[in-house]
Image (cartoon, rainbow, N blue to C red):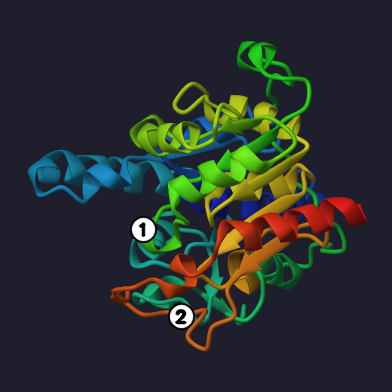
Amino acid sequence: MIVKPSALGDIVHSLPFLNAVKRGFPLARVDWVVAHGLHTFLEGHPLINRLWVIKKDQWKKVGNLKQTVREINDLRRGMGACGYDVSIDLSGLFRSGVISYFSKAGIRLGFKESDEGSPFFYTHKIHGSMDIHAIDRYLKIAQFMGCPTDEIAYPFAPYDLFPEICKGLPQSYVVMSPSAGKPANRWHAHKFGELASKLSLPVVVISSAAEAYIADEVVFHSKGNAVSIAGKTGLKELLAVIGRADYFICNDTGPMHMAAALNIPVFAIFGPANPVRTGPYGKIHTVIQKDLECSPCYRQKPCAHYRCMEDLGVSQVLAVIQEKIKQS
């Protein structure tokens, strides 16, 4: 059982681990614990026998306490009856540690440096290091299990390579993803729009429906060179849209890892986050980050000014993109 409920980028990072496990144990049954909403990304996966879909966001709401207790008890009983041999917690949180314990697996693997007390639930604690990329970190557990880790592959669940949404897009285009999970990781939408106006290819802007207003602002400032498909794709359709792009421009966000996995050149704008840990994986990608003494930072409370993002100008980002495209 693999415990990796979220987020989207983290699930993409976990696919090479899944690939390594199935290479090492091709006949093993593999189940996956995933958050509701992200489960569609893994549905129908030929390497996954069963998805345990949890509503973790609803579990946080006090008003849902009665339903949450019932769902957790059902989860505990269901997992305990499956006869798991091995459980792997790739999240390293208290919740994921408890879920790993629910498996009743004789071997429960997780990272030694995980927080929130999750190592208490493991039988074996692996040193993963916080100074390497998440993909390489996850593969340390695969290596501990005796699985081959010489190959980085992303086995996606089957998806339509040319869904209806793609039929209305230009033949060649750039994808922009101006959203980000944390405000500190967002380069301003109007800067994305200004950048879009200066690119030689048309721009397709993506985001969730809830953040469509960000995409709309990009389009507004693009001088007619961008269109928004915010909220118009599922996760698998998004793979198809990104996979047909010439290149991808983004903040530190989940779709960035989709693009990297699809081998689409990524230009990722980073602020306080550490690209060594969570940047686009691969040599063809480019991280654009202001060189500041305070970046990357791991402050619990964000600073008031976000210099790492505020001081990064459109002309600087455009120059990097144009130079890389010229070289390639």
Q: Can you name the residue that lies furthest to the right here? A: 328
Say above or below: 281 vs 291.
above
Q: In the rendered image, is residue 247 in sight?
A: yes
Identity, as a three-letter code, of the amino acid under mark 2: Cys
* Local secondary structure at mark 1: helix
Circle 1 residues within 10 Å: few <14, some 14–19, many ≥20: few
- Looking at the rendered structure, the secondary structure element under dot 2 is loop
Does residue 128 lie above or below 80 as drawn? below
Residue at figure coordinates x 39%, y 32% from the top left: 212
Residue 297 — which label?
2
Residue displayed at 45% across by 51% down: 180
Asked if residue 29 shows in the view, the reply is: no
Residue toward you, 33 or 321: 321
Q: Which residue in the protein does label 1 denote?
A: 183
Disc on the earlier residue, 1 or 2? 1
Answer left or right for 138 relative to 120: right
Instruction: Specify whether 325 is left or right of 249.
Output: right
Q: Residue at x 40, y 60 (%)?
A: 96
The x and y percentages for residue 174 are 69, 36
Between marks 1 and 2, how big is the CA–CA gap? 14 Å
Amino acid type of the residue that numbered disc 1 sits on in the rendered structure = Pro
Q: Does 19 sit left or right of 98 as displayed?
A: right
Q: Nearer the viewer, residue 307 or 15?
A: 307
